[in-house]
Amino acid sequence: MYLSKRAINIKESITLKLNEKAVGLAEKGNTIYNLTAGQLPFRPMDDFVKSIEKELNFLKSYQYAPVAGFADLRKKLKAYVENNRSISFNGHGVDFDCVISNGAKHSIYNIIGSITDPGDEIIVLAPYWISYPEMVMCWGGIPVVVESNKHNNFTPTMDDIRKKITSKTKAILVNSPNNPAGIHYSNQWMNDFAKLLNDFPNLLVISDEIYYELSYFDPKPTYFYQYDSKLLKRTMIVEGISKSFAATGLRIGFCITTKEIADAISKLQAQTTSSANSLIQRALVSFDFAKMPEFLNPVRNHLKINAQSIRRIFSEMGLSHIWYQTTSAFYYLVDFSSAPVFKRYSSSSSSASASASTSNGDECNDYCIQICSDLLEKHGIAMVPGADFGIHNSGRLSLVLEEEIFTRAMKILANFLRGE
C-alpha cells in the first residue's frame, strides 16, 4: 500500500536475477556455466590501473567533481569520439558538450528524462536491451517497438521503422553493436537510416554505442551521422568504459550532444546523483587512449574464437539452421523455436509458464523462461530468456567465458537443443 505505481510496475532485471541464481548454485558446489553477464573475464589494462593508483595520492580524487564531469576529461572524450568516428563537432551552428555519468545506463536514463514528456513515444528497435522500455515508462513515455528476427539478422527494416513514426514520436533509440543480438547494423542500413531521418526533421536519436570498440569481424560499425553530419545536431551519442576497458564496476559512462540538451542532462543529474566517480575520472584524464588497441586486440580475438565455436559445434550437431553470424559485442541469441527440443515444450499440456504478450498486444506462447530454467537447474547452463529483449522463444548467451570452458558449455547446450 505504500509503493508507487511506478515502482510496482518496473520489471525486475531478469539478467541480474539469473546471474544471482547461477552464482548461488555455484557456491553450493554445482558446476555452472554462467553465460548471463556482459562483462569480460579480463583485468583492465595495466596503464589504466597505474593511472588509478597514481591518483590515489591526491585529495581531489576523493572530493566532488563538477556535476557534468571534469572539464579536461569531457574535452578529451569529445576528441576521442571525433577521432574514432572520423567526425567533427565543429561547424554545425551549435555547440556540443559532454556529460559524464555513473555508467552508460545512467546516461541513457538522464537523456530520456531530459527529452521525454508524458505521452511522448520513443521508438526502440528489437532486439533491445532490457532496460530501454522500462526507462522510457519511468519518465511517462511510451516505448514503441519495431520488431525483427533471426531471418533478417535482427535488423529492423526502414519500412517497419517508418510505419511506427507518429506525431507523438520524440526519439528513436538505436543500439549498435547490439545487446542482445551481437550484431551491428550494416553500412547500408546506417546510410538508409540517415535518409529516413531527413524525412522527419524533428526526430531525435539516442545512439547507444557502448560496444563500439568490440567488433571482431569487418567491416567495423559505422553510424548514420557519418553519412550525414547534419544529423549530429539531433543525436545523443552514448559511450563508456564498462565494456571496452573491462571495467563494469567503475561506473563511468558519458554522452555527447548539443549544449542545450547536455545542460538539461546536467541539471537532472545535479538533483539525483551529482557527479560521477572523481577518482576514475582523474585517472582517465591522465590515461593515454591511444593504448587501447593493444588491450582490445586479444579481447576481440577471444570473442571471435568463441563465436566461431558456436558455428562449429552447432554445425557438427546438426543445428546449423539455428545459427547466424555474430560480429560484435558479447552476445548470441539462441533460437529455441527452431531447435528439436522445442517440441517438448510446445506440445506440453501445461502452458502456465508459456503466456507472454508481444509488443503489439497479441498473445503468444513463449517458453523461454521455462527453457532457461531447465537449462540452469538440470544442465548447469545459465542463459537469459529472450522475451525481455523483445525476441520470444529465445535465450541470450554471453561469449566471454574462457575458450575451453565456453566450448564445453556449447556442447552441453547443443545436446539439449537436439532434445537429448
Image (tube, grey):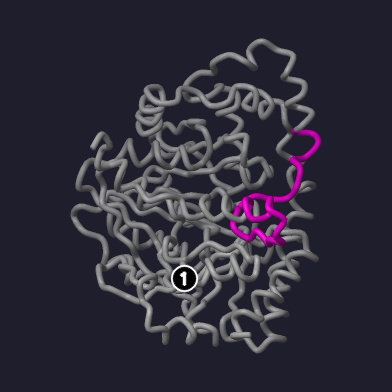
> What kind of residue is marked 1?
Cys
Work out whether residue 19 or residue 48 is closer to the camera in this orientation and state it. 19
Residue at the location (65% across, 65% down)? 380
Q: Position of residue 119 (x, y in %)?
A: 20, 47
Give the residues drawn in magenta, as a range: 23-48
Q: Where is residue 29 in the image (x, y as percent from the top left)?
A: 72, 56
Quadrant of the frame with the C terminus: bottom right
Residue at the location (64% across, 51% down)? 23
Q: Position of residue 198 (x, y in %)?
A: 33, 57
Magenta span main SS: loop
Quadrant position of residue 113: top left
Q: For mark 1, what is the residue?
A: 368
Whether 27 is among the magenta residues is: yes
* Above or below, comparing residue 161 to residue 72 in the picture: below
- Total count of labels: 1
* Above or below, comparing residue 39 to residue 75 in the picture: below
Q: Which residue lies furthest to the top in this view?
A: 59
In the visual, does 229 lie left or right of 142? right
For disc 1, the neighbor class at 10 Å (few under 14, some 14 to 19, many from 20) is: many
Quadrant of the frame with the N terminus: top left
Q: Can residue 192 be seen in this view?
A: no
